[in-house]
Amino acid sequence: MPDLGVRASVCARGGRKDLTMPGAIMFEFPDLFFTGLFLTVQLSVLGSIGALAAGTLIALFRISPIPPLRWVGVAYVEFFRNTPLLVQLFFLFLGLGALGFRFWTTDTFESIFRAGAAGMALYHGAYVAEVIRGGLLGVDKGQIEAARSLGLSYVQTLRYVQLPQTFRATIPPLGNIGIALIKNTSLASTIGVAELLQAAEIVESRTFRTEEAFGAVVLLYLVLTIPASLGVNWLERRLLVAR
Amino acid sequence: MPIIEFHDVHKWFGPLHVLNGIDLKVDEGEVVVVIGPSGSGKSTLIRTIDRLEPIQRGSLVVDGMPVHDPKADVNALRRRVGMVFQQFNLFPHLTAVENIMLAPRKVKGLNAAASRKRAQELLAKVGIPEKADQLPVRLSGGQQQRVAIARALAMDPKIMLFDEPTSALDAEMIREVLDVMRQLAQEGMTMVVVTHEIGFAREASDRVVFMDAGRIIEDSPTGEFFAGAREERARQFLSKVIHH
Amino acid sequence: MRSILVRITALGAAVAVLAAACGGGGGAPTQPSPTAAPAATAAAKPKFELASYQYAIQTKGKLKVGTREDNVPFGLKNPATCKFEGFDVDVVREFAIAIFGAEGKADPDKFIEYVPVVSATRIPTLKDNKADIVAATFTVNEERLKEIDFSTVYFRTGQKILVKKSDTTIKEVADLKGKTVCTAKGSTSEKNIAAKNKDAKLLLLDSYPPCLIALQQGQADAVSTDETILFGLVKQDPNTKIVGGYFSDEPYGIGIAKGRTGFAPFLNKVIADMIADGRWAALYKKHITPVSGDVKDGPHDKGRPGG
């Protein structure tokens, strides 16, 4: 077991064994904690990209001039926003599994991971869709007319005039959704994804060092979420200056 | 050979009959000013030419294209017709030059270098070459409107429409915009202008159209109109506007 | 296919809906009446030493019990009635009767506050004082004894393997090499598999019903945990079978926090009495026989190959 010296230095000073530095336990079980951290990061990144893509598409559906697309958009948002993420994860893992769909892989763990990432994307996509829709509707109607009068098509107007402004205006709420998504990846542990929380649960059940195990996980989540918050603030400031 | 031809055009907003039997012809190279009290339908009239407002009855042919036909290629029409709005409507996330380049690049497929060069020329033409890389928020109203004119010109339209282009501007900025429009008129651009600027109408237009309550009340050559409008309502309106 | 979907939906929904539908863990029906209980029936209650923990519970008027909600046949919150049932639950009711006397016998649940637990939350629930006892197929072992105390063993089983009936490749724990084995997080089962066959791939879920579905769908090749729990799973899905011998000894005890004066001996006495007077055998017959087919009169060691 690699010891990075944190525990040793405490012991050398005569400290008791359970007086290790907060988070030191993660270096005793690096396989569990850091593999878990990596999976959490992967879930967060893939989930965020997916949520942004799904949310943008659904937002476009919701403001579309074609009624059936609007209905699909409304149904999506209401379904994914009004059912618990946990239930959605179970459905993606076991429900779709029952229908024979395994996310294009025969490997159980890969399929569970993909179910987890899809769950993150679909659930948070509903929130993203509402934010983006608000942003799109917030773009001044005159600009849309100006774009159309120049010969830009409906889609080109969305793409070059409405969406770029929407993304700028919606960075703070989108950032909040992203941070919530990072924290919500912990729910993937319930369908068997060996992410951070599950790593802590395993370490806890093997060592009974509950406070240390979950303390380490709290630290690792903060390592992910605090930079994310700072990044969102920075982007927001930068774009405010640019205006 | 008229480039814009209205024939018995009607439009309703709900129960409101905003265009009531419009007959109007504009020849190529002509500058026509539309005046009238607010609510007379003049903005709606000009917006139908670009099909920003669809019409419900009658025929409207612009540059050979039947605008009244729902199947008409509206984007092709709009490429040939430039529009300038009261509120400028620049894209706030793009710089002046990017505002001008967007449509040539995305609609005409021009490359970046060619469209930028053309945009710079147009900015020079409207008198603000040094503002190329400014975002709209950093420009005065007059400068914004001149960028908007350059943006419309970048598509090399055959017709330019102006919907109260100076109404949102302070007095000192109105002049710089009107100067650009006067220059365009001299160059032979076909223009339809909705405005309250009687001075501009008098100096730069070929014809004046007076509208009230959704109808064209008077349509006279500029000289005749100002020498003595035939219609009582036009005379009343004129006296009010001029005394202000 | 449809029935599986319905069950998954029910499973997922259970997590969210049950709590709400059953009024936040069934607290309401177990609340003792604050005025009537202490004064009126003081005479009918057993006498305990003032320093003992059971006296504290009696005074408090409530026994807080950590148990599972989805662990047939030991602890189950019946979705239809919102009441807890199972072997563990009935043992707990005997404790309530022993503490609260005649009134407890009339309606033990009136004196019990159920705290839902999963494998991983059993020890924290005790340490954080959220429950007085945890009765949840809780295996007594050395590591856990460092953290908490246990009663004497009230039930004994061992770990086995559940596979699909059609499976011919898995016969014992050694065959799990490279296979995906589903078990509950924070359970001894997880540690036992990891110890007996490090080449088995562990799929760790919160409880066993999802593991059964994973097995049915082929997401898992096997489910492994205590045989008694596997009995419950076979009952739910007759297309599964239990294979191999015991590869662990799982003596269940009632978990209690450390430092509960006189409490463990008290529980031990209740357990011993239950075994001696046949109440234990009756509970076995009621809950376990329907799934196992055998009859027992106490947590004996005999007939256990693994040990």
Image (spheres, helix red, strand yellow):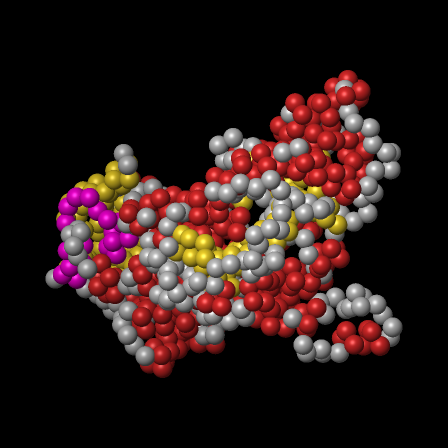
Q: Residue at image x 53%, y 35%?
A: C286
Q: Residue at image x 47%, y 42%?
A: C293
- Residue C297 position (above or below residue C307): above
Instruction: Report whether residue A129 is seen.
Output: no
User: Magenta stretch: residue B58 in it?
Assistant: yes
Residues in magenta, as a range: B44-67
Place residue B197 in its image quadrant: bottom left
Left or right for A236, reference B123: right
Give residue A64's position: percent from left, percent from top. Answer: 32, 52
Give residue B186's position: percent from left, percent from top. Answer: 29, 69
Give residue A28's position: percent from left, percent from top. Answer: 68, 72
Left or right for A218, reference A109: right
Q: Residue at image x 82%, y 73%?
A: A10
Place residue C103 in its image quadrant: top right
Give residue C122's position: percent from left, percent from top. Answer: 66, 49
Quadrant for the N terminus of chain A in the image: bottom right
- Say which of A145 and A21 sits in front: A21
Left or right for C75, reference B177: right
Q: Residue furthest left?
A: B1
User: Magenta stretch: residue A88 in it?
Assistant: no
Instruction: Report whether residue B69 is seen.
Output: yes
Place residue A196 in its image quadrant: bottom right
